[in-house]
Structure formats: C-alpha cells, structure tokens
Image (cartoon, grey):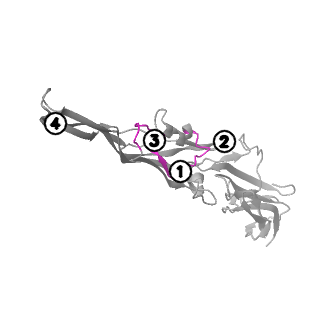
C-alpha cells in the first residue's frame, strides 16, 4: 500500500500480446487487428508453348500438319495454418508460434502432349495428339524452404507479418514460361482479441521474480487499450483494509478511496475520484483486517482504465 495506508495487496499481471498476421496494408483498423489463421489457395490454369508436327510429303498425300500445345496446367486447392499459443507468460510477452499445417488439397495437374500413335511406324494418317496427365500433390506449401515460409516468419510470430491479399504465383512456384494464368491468394481470418489473450495467459503474482521489473504490489488495476500496437498491460488487484483504534462491539465502516483514469497506450487521462461502497463490520478487536481471514476485495477492472487506491478510511457507522 502507499505510505500511510495499511492493508494487504495482491497483484497479478502480464504484458499481453496478440498472435498472428496483421491486416492487409490497405485495410488496417485502429487499433490494429490480428488474425490467427492463414489460408493459401491456388487457382487458375496455364499453357506451355505451341508446337507443330508435320508428317509426310506435301506433294504426296496423306500429309498432316498437326498443331498442339505441348503442355498445360490446372491449379486448384487450398491449405490453412493456425497459430498456437503458449499458456504462460515469457519475457517477450505472450508466447506465439506457428501451428501444424492443416490438410492440403492443393494439386497441380499437368497434361503433356506429343504426336504419335499406338503402333510405332504407323502412317501419317493414323498419327494424333497423345496426352499424358500427371497430378502433383496434395502439396504442403508450409514445409521445406518454399518461399511461402516468408509468410510464417519462420515461426517468429512476435513480428506478425503483413500480407497482401493476392500475389502472382510465379513468385512462389515456377512452372516455366507462360505461367501467367496461375494465381495464389493468401487470406487471413479468425481474429485474435484482447479478451482471448487474457483468457489463455497465466498471470504473474507479485512480488516475484518476473520479466516486468516490478518488484512489489501496486494499489491499482490496469487494462490498457491498444492504439497502434498489438500488446498491452493487464494487471489485477485484490486488497484488505486494516483498521486500528477500534472499540470491540462498536459498528464501523471501512472504505477505500479510489480514483480512475483512462489508459490508452501513449495517452493516459486525468485522475477522477470514484465512489467505492464501504464495508460495514462489528469490531472484535482493537485492530482488525477487513475482510477477515483469506477473503479479499477486488478492485474494478475495466478495459481502457486504471483504478487506484489512494487512501483507506475507518470510521463509526
């Protein structure tokens, strides 16, 4: 408690951090939103080079001039990956990491074309375009050294990546020339929230060895509102009030004097006095802790505010 205030305090706190990917650069919210799921989708088709097969003597029919595309692709499917969260607090704040990729349905179907026929040495009139179809996949696009990993930051989710909504697939998987028909769309979804971070985080009780350089309890609660970042401080406070000079049998009231202020990161407001209901009790001794035994009173906790005890009054009811 502050100098001159007698009682007992219990604090638990943590520096909270949202996990995941930021919004796209042209669509940012205030405060920033973070999403825990990344989905990569392949779509489209592409063609290779045109080829011509000529067979026979133009002056001695049958003569064939067969035109065909030597190769074509069809791209389809998607795969998602979702963040995983640490359940305890670390020196870097809330722990975040990439999770296990979900099942992939991403396939690339390639059709190779040649000219021939079933019987070697067959006459020109029997030659035709023959197709061989090969399907590659499903492909785990989040494994290995694929450039998709630049979206994962190699597991370091503290610096959440800002991704664009659509990027040319040629930058990621090369299929040779003429591949302009393939697109890769990266979509972020499932918003992480301040409440979700609080629910999954184990708070540190003071005093204790902790990464926040706070060595003793403080008489306040705090739930910061984010402005431009993805982290915020969250602190709980419970207290008991000590009254002395009591006359056993007399009825008294114990009341904390509380004030509050807005707590937006980078812009804290002015203190305002708050009314806190007194606790009525019958004295059983000359000194008494209110409430008694292991019971505590919880100081209000509201997002965007800090509440602080500045004094304690004990008086006859």
Under tag 2, what secondary structure?
Answer: loop
Can you give x and y, in whole percent of width and height, for residue 102 in the image?
41, 43
Q: What segment carries the magenta color? A: 155-179
Disc 3 from disc 1: Cα separation: 15 Å
Query: Badge 2: how crowded within 10 Å, few (<14), some, or many (20+)?
Result: few
Is disc 1 in contact with disc 4, using a CB cutoff of under 8 Å?
no
* Sequence-earlier tag: 3 or 1: 1
109 displayed left or right of 307: left
Under tag 4, what secondary structure?
Answer: strand
Mark 2 = which residue?
A: 92
Disc 2 from disc 3: Cα separation: 36 Å
* Residue 163 forms part of the magenta stretch: yes
113 displayed left or right of 106: left
Can you give x and y, in whole percent of width and height, for residue 244 in the image?
84, 60
Mark 4 = which residue?
A: 63
* Sequence-earlier tag: 4 or 3: 4
């Amino acid at each position: 408690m502050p100098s001159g205030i007698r009682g007992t305090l219990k604090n638990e706190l943590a520096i909270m951090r949202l996990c995941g990917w930021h919004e796209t650069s042209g669509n940012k919210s205030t405060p920033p939103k973070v999403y825990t799921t990344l989905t990569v989708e392949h779509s489209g088709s592409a063609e290779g080079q045109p080829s011509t097969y000529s067979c026979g003597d133009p002056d001695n029919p049958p003569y064939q001039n067969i035109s065909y595309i030597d190769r074509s692709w069809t791209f389809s499917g998607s795969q998602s990956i979702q963040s995983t969260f640490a359940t305890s607090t670390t020196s870097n704040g809330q722990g975040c990491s990439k999770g296990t990729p979900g099942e992939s349905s991403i396939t690339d179907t390639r059709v190779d074309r040649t000219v021939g026929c079933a019987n070697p040495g067959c006459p020109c009139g029997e030659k035709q375009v023959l197709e061989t179809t090969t399907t590659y996949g499903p492909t785990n696009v989040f494994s290995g050294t694929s450039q998709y990993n630049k979206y994962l930051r190699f597991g370091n989710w503290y610096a959440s990546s800002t991704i664009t909504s659509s990027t040319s697939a040629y930058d990621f998987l090369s299929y040779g020339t003429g591949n302009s028909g393939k697109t890769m769309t990266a979509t972020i979804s499932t918003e992480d929230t301040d409440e979700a971070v609080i629910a999954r985080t184990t708070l540190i009780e003071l005093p204790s060895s902790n990464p926040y350089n706070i060595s003793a309890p403080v008489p306040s609660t705090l739930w910061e509102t984010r402005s431009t970042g993805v982290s915020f401080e969250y602190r709980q406070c419970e207290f008991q009030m000590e009254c002395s000079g009591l006359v056993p049998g007399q009825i008294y009231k114990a009341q904390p004097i509380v004030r509050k202020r807005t707590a937006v990161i980078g812009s804290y407001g002015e203190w305002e006095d708050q009314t806190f209901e007194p606790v009525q009790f019958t004295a059983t001794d000359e000194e008494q802790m209110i409430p008694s035994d292991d019971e505590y009173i919880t100081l209000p906790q509201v997002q965007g505010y800090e509440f602080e005890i500045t004094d304690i009054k004990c008086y006859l009811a």
